[in-house]
Amino acid sequence: MKRYKITTFSINTSRSILQDSRQGPIFDKLKEDIKNEIVAQFGSFNATEKMERYLALKPPVLSVVDEHTYLQRDIINAYIAGNFYPALTGACCLGERIFNTIIAKLKNDFKSSAWYKEVYDKDSTDKWDQAIKILHDWGIIDEGLKESYYRLMVLRNDSVHYQKKDQDASAMSFESISIVNEIIIKLFALDQNRKNILLYFDVPGEILIKKSAENDPLVRAFYIPCSTYVGPFYRIEPLNATNRHRLIDLQYEDKEISDDEFVKLRNEYTNRKESKI
C-alpha cells in the first residue's frame, strides 16, 4: 500500500520571486530581502551586473539531491561573481562527472547492453562521445539532451585545450552552465514535466513516486534514495518542542493499491486532519 515520498530535495525559489510581477508590501519586502542577501553574498562591487547574471541563470527550482547539487551551486556562484573561466571549466567537469555517476550507478541494470563490456570494470571514463551514446542508447537522455551534451563537449574541448582564436569566457561559461542546468532539470528535477514518474502535488504539498516508476533505473538510483516509504495515513509530529520532527506511520495490509487509490486515501486522511484543527 505504500509509496515513496520525496523528502530530501534542493529548493530555490528566489529567482521566481524576484521575477514575479506581483506587488504589495509583503511581496516587495521579500524581494528586497532576497536582493540584500545576494549583495551580501557576492559583494556590492558591480552589484547590478552580478544581479543580472544571477537572474539570467535558470537552475531547477526543485530537484533531488546528489553530488551534482553542491557542485552546481559552486559553479553558479563563480559565474555570478564574474569568475568566468573557473565557471566554464567547472560546468564542463560537472557534465562529465554527471554522466560518469549515472553510468557507474546504472551499469548493472544494463548487463544485456552491448556497452556493458565497455564499462562494467571501470569507475569512470573521459570518452565523452562514448558516454553520450551510452546514455542515449540506455534511454536515459533523449535526442535533445544528447545534442546538448555534444555541445558541452565542444565547449569543454575549446576551454581546456589551447585555441588559436579569441574566446569569450563570459559567453562560454553562461552557455556551459545553461546546458548543465538543462541536464539536471531533465534528469533530476521535481516538476510537472516529470509526471511520467511522479505524482506531482496530486496530494497537496507532497511529491510521490509512481508505483510503475519504482523499478526505473534512474529513479531507483537517484530518486528513491531521496525518499521515505510511507503509507497513506502517515503523519509528521514535532519532536520534543524542537525544530525537529518525526514521521509516524501505521502497519498496513500486505496488498497493492493503485496510485489513484493511494492519492484518494491520502487526501481523505489529510482533509480529516485539517477539519479537526
Image (cartoon, rainbow, N blue to C red):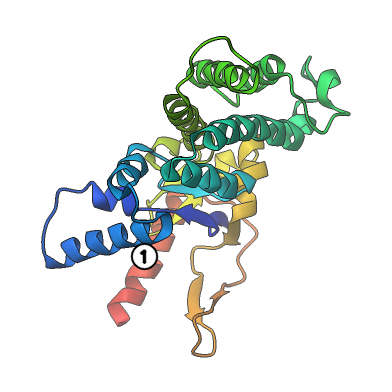
Residue placed most toward the observer, 211 or 178:
178
Residue with the mark numbered 1? 268
- The percent coordinates of residue 192 (x first, y second) are 38, 40
For the question of whether residue 27 can be seen, the reply is yes
The local secondary structure at tag 1 comes to helix
Residue 76 to residue 103: above or below: below
Q: Quadrant of residue 72?
A: top right
Q: Amino acid at mark 1?
A: Glu
- The percent coordinates of residue 194 (x first, y second) are 45, 37
Left/right placement of residue 214 relative to residue 109 reads left
- The percent coordinates of residue 246 (x first, y second) are 56, 77
Left/right placement of residue 139 relative to residue 130 reads left
Task: Check the image and name the residue furthest to the bottom.
Answer: 240
Residue placed most toward the observer, 20 or 6:
20
Residue 153 to residue 165: above or below: below
Q: Residue at x 59, y 13 (%)?
A: 163
Left/right placement of residue 248 relative to residue 193 reads right
Looking at the rendered image, the quarter that the C terminus falls into is bottom left
Q: Residue at x 60, y 31 (%)?
A: 95
Q: Quadrant of residue 55?
A: top left
For the question of whether residue 258 can be seen, the reply is no
Residue placed most toward the observer, 16 or 186:
16
- The percent coordinates of residue 24 (x first, y second) are 10, 62
Q: Residue at x 59, y 31 (%)?
A: 89
Residue 25 to residue 50: above or below: below
Task: Check the image and name the residue furthest to the top.
Answer: 164
Looking at the rendered image, the quarter that the N terminus falls into is bottom right
Q: Residue at x 57, y 9 (%)?
A: 164
